[in-house]
Image (tube, grey):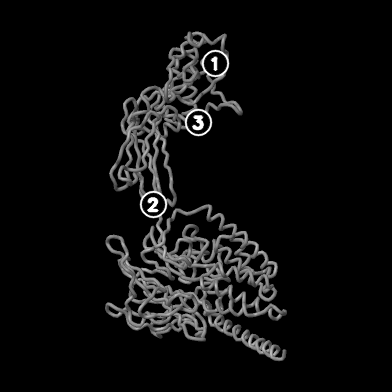
Amino acid sequence: MKNILLSISLLFSVVVLAQPAAVVKADAAFKSGKYYEAAELAVKAYEKISPRNERALDLKSSLAYKAGYSFEKAFDTEKAIEWYQRAIDLRHYEENPYVYFRIANNYKKQGSYDKARENYEEFLTLVPIDKQAQNALASLEEAVVMKDNRTRYTVKSETKINDAGLDMAPSISSRRGNAIVFGSTRSSSVSGGTDPITGEGFFNIWEVEKERSGNWTAPKLFEADSLNTEHNEGTMVFDGRFRNIFFTRCPSVHKKALGCQIWMAEKKGRSFGLPEKLPLAPSDTISVGHPLPNENGSALIFSSDMPGGFGGRDLWYTEYDRRAKTWSKPENLGAAVNTAGDELFPTFALNGDLFFASNGHKGLGGLDIFRAKKSDDPKVFTAPENLGTPLNSDANDYHLIEMDERNGFFTSNRSGSVGSKNLPDIWSYELPPNIFDLKVIVTEVGGVSRIEGATVEVTPEGGTAFTKVTNENGEVFWDKKPDGTRFINEETDFVVKVLTTEGYHESDNIEVFSTKELKYDQNFILEMNLLPKTPIVLPEVRYDLGSSVLQVKEGEINSKDSLNYVYDLLQEYPGMVLKLVSHTDARGSARTNERLAKARAQSCVDYLVNEKGVDPKRLIPTGKGENSPRIIYKQDGKYLPNKPSGEFEAIELKESFINQFKSSDKELFEQLHQYNRRTEAEVVRMDFNESKSE
């Protein structure tokens, strides 16, 4: 029995001694930022601790949180959620409520917005004034809107560049724009082993070039002395003149938590000189990285967690003094850009706007890409706008570069990345051309009867005109050419006219439209008019029975408004001279109707001359009384005043025809008489010149 008790005592002592050692080892890896190692060490330490008392439970909850945080930093979202939840189950939130915030962020990365919302709300009950969490909670609603309003961009993974490791932060590396550099953890000749932070290889700078065929060459290490080392090198960029390179180096030293630094190398002939570290960080434990030089390399925007920011990593600005050969004290870009979260990977748009990634502004998941417009001050940018889907996703999206106005690259670890871990890859995007088409409808003046057989001509700015003949509906339509290109292209002005058509006056009327600066698809629909050589039926002009006074009744037809159509017609065609012809129905004597019709025509002329200022020499009043019955059209049992499309019967509204409905259909009888009471316009000439004696 004594031997058994001694054995149990010794075993217990070993376990008690082993537990603190495992915890200390896990803590050391965690504090030094070796997250890949820390995750596994924290899990092992967690499993060795027996939950025999409150102290042990507290220790297990702390280790569960550190495991979750480490898995998150090592790009394992599933395990991060698992271990954050264990920490929550062990009431770690009583010590550190941010466990709710971090698990919510990871649910958001997965697109699990309901679970993210639940955990953000739990966090805010404990820390109700946290602006970052309030912003993250509010962004969930906007994320749904952005997904429902997908932009026109298309994206794809560059599978010929990426491998199963981490590939990120592409940048243009040649003046011709046919080569890019990027950071990658793939196996290389200058570094080996496993990075204790990511669990992958160490980052080096690689380069690929696009061949004339459009294919990428095999990636190769970027050629520059002492640039790629056994440490992590990434996020390399060139200044606008390709004379200087700036890159991030993150040293990996055993048992030391060293921050990243920005290095610079200057062009020396065809190669680059030895890189030099820029003295931007106040200490070795502060990280600076993701450099963004201006055109000549005299100023730099970068990301850092240095003191004086808004929280997390912020974007900062510094300038180089060539005389003193020093960089100025960094200035924070301010609250318009920076948040309590992280702002990373700044790049310039072609027009000088600022792209950057953030998890502090309202977005979809992890890091989203934003655009802030430039100002006259290189340190000041407007409030940023989220680029929306599909450039952004539930995953991390960052470091976007524009190759031209339609194409570029960015980094993302969204679904579809190479490998099984959804590690960051290089993705490309394309903005497809806007799709425009044109429909022209040709009608007689008045916009009622459509004209078949009219030739419409469209002339693009600086291009060759194209034509088409209207169909039976008076329409022509242009979209795609036989070769797949489009008739209506972007950034172009167009002139449209209807060529001379039999039975119609020659028209100098043209329509213009433009696709310049349009950022969306559009169907252009133009309606164009031709003047018939037959009488033009004007909008209805009414008079009281037996009167020539223009009828104006409240809530009913306003004859003056109808005559304004004539005024507009004369304004549109300054060479036009019109004969205004009034007609009556067949009731009453022919002589009386003729006099009444002439008086009514004169009333129309008087209004246009006296109240609208029309030159009287452009108007000729004529009364035809009942002598010219109107032509109407019967289609599907209905009598129509205007010519319809399709099959119809033309009918002259003689008194004998109308009288057949006098007893059988009183309403139709009155309607047909009303059709005969009308005012028409006949074009007398189109060459009126006010400056000449008429």
Q: Secondary structure at mark 2?
A: loop
* Image quadrant where residue 9 sits: bottom right
Sequence-earlier tag: 2 or 3: 2
**Residue 611 tag number:** 3
Front-lying residue, 222 or 92:
92
Question: How far separated are the C-alphas under marks 2 and 1?
Answer: 55 Å
Tell me where residue 354 appears, x and y as whole percent: 46, 66
Sequence-earlier tag: 2 or 1: 2
Which residue is disc 2 drawn over? Answer: 433
Question: How far separated are the C-alphas under marks 1 and 3?
Answer: 36 Å
Q: Secondary structure at mark 1?
A: helix
Going by the numbered disc 1, the residue's amino acid type is Leu
Q: Is residue 597 left or right of residue 81?
A: left
Going by the numbered disc 3, the residue's amino acid type is Glu
Which residue is disc 1 drawn over? Answer: 668
| Residue at 43% from the left image edge and 75% from the top image edge | 291
